Image (cartoon, rainbow, N blue to C red):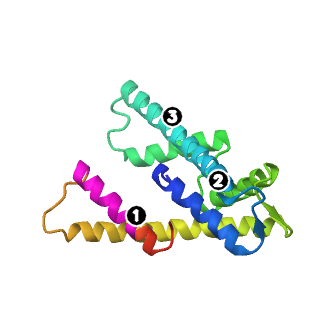
């Protein structure tokens, strides 16, 4: 998945702030309404990808059930990727990162303008580029933040078990600190 559900509110806030700071955009109602709409659009995009992944998992499971020897010497992850890409292609969902972010940015500009949540006097492409850059920067910095959190957790005196409740709580706290440090929230 390109964007995870937990990242959506942070990403929506970053896009809104970057639009405001660009100097190209004003928010006729207020920035919170635009942020909420951005969050809903990104959440829908994430949900769509999750549906595609669920369909791919179901197809893979059915194929394995029908012919258990078919996947004897095959990497399940590669088969899953192939099935996912076929379903995505059929549904018109772009899995290529740059193109997907570009499509998302274009859709956000259109929806925010149509719903009169933003106003601007420049070409649509400039606004789309601000959003595209914002998303790409977020994704890059988010990976850095996540890596920093894992390194901090590795250096804890008492080892934390990944997946445990304690691990998740510590991870979330440290993750938010790292996102703040990087200006993502």
- One can see residue 86 in this view: no
Residue, x 51% and y 68% (percent of image)? 184
Left or right of residue 140, residue 16 in this image:
right
Query: Are the two marked residues, 3 and 2, in contact with CB atoms closer than 8 angstroms?
Result: no
* Residue under the point 58% across and 61% down: 13
The magenta-colored residue range is 163-177
Image disc number at residue 176: 1
Residue 30 lies, in percent from the top left, at: 71, 58
Q: CA distance from mark 2 to mark 1?
A: 20 Å
Q: Is residue 38 above or below residue 19?
A: above
Mark linked to residue 8: none
**Res 29 → quadrant:** bottom right
Could you say which quadrant of the image residue 175 lies in? bottom left
Q: Kindly state the secondary structure of the residue where label 2 is placed.
A: helix
| Residue 26 visible in this rendered orientation of the protein | yes
The label number, if any, that marks residue 55 in the structure image = 3
- Residue on which the image places disc 2: 38
């Amino acid at each position: 998945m390109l964007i995870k559900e937990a990242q959506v509110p942070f990403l929506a806030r970053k896009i809104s702030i970057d639009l405001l700071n660009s100097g190209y955009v004003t928010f006729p109602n207020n920035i919170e309404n635009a942020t909420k709409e951005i969050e809903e659009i990104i959440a829908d995009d994430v949900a769509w990808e999750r549906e595609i992944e669920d369909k791919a998992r179901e197809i893979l499971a059915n194929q394995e059930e029908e012919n258990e020897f078919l996947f004897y010497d095959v990497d399940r992850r590669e088969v899953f990727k192939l099935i996912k890409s076929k379903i995505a292609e059929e549904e018109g969902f772009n899995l290529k990162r740059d193109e997907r972010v570009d499509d998302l940015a274009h859709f956000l500009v259109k929806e925010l303008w149509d719903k009169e949540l933003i106003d601007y006097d420049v070409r649509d492409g400039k606004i789309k580029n601000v959003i595209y850059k914002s998303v790409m920067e977020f994704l890059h910095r988010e990976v850095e933040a996540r890596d920093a959190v894992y390194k901090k957790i590795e250096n804890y005196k008492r080892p934390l078990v990944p997946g445990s409740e304690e691990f998740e709580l510590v991870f979330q706290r440290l993750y938010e600190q790292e996102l703040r440090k990087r200006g993502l929230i």
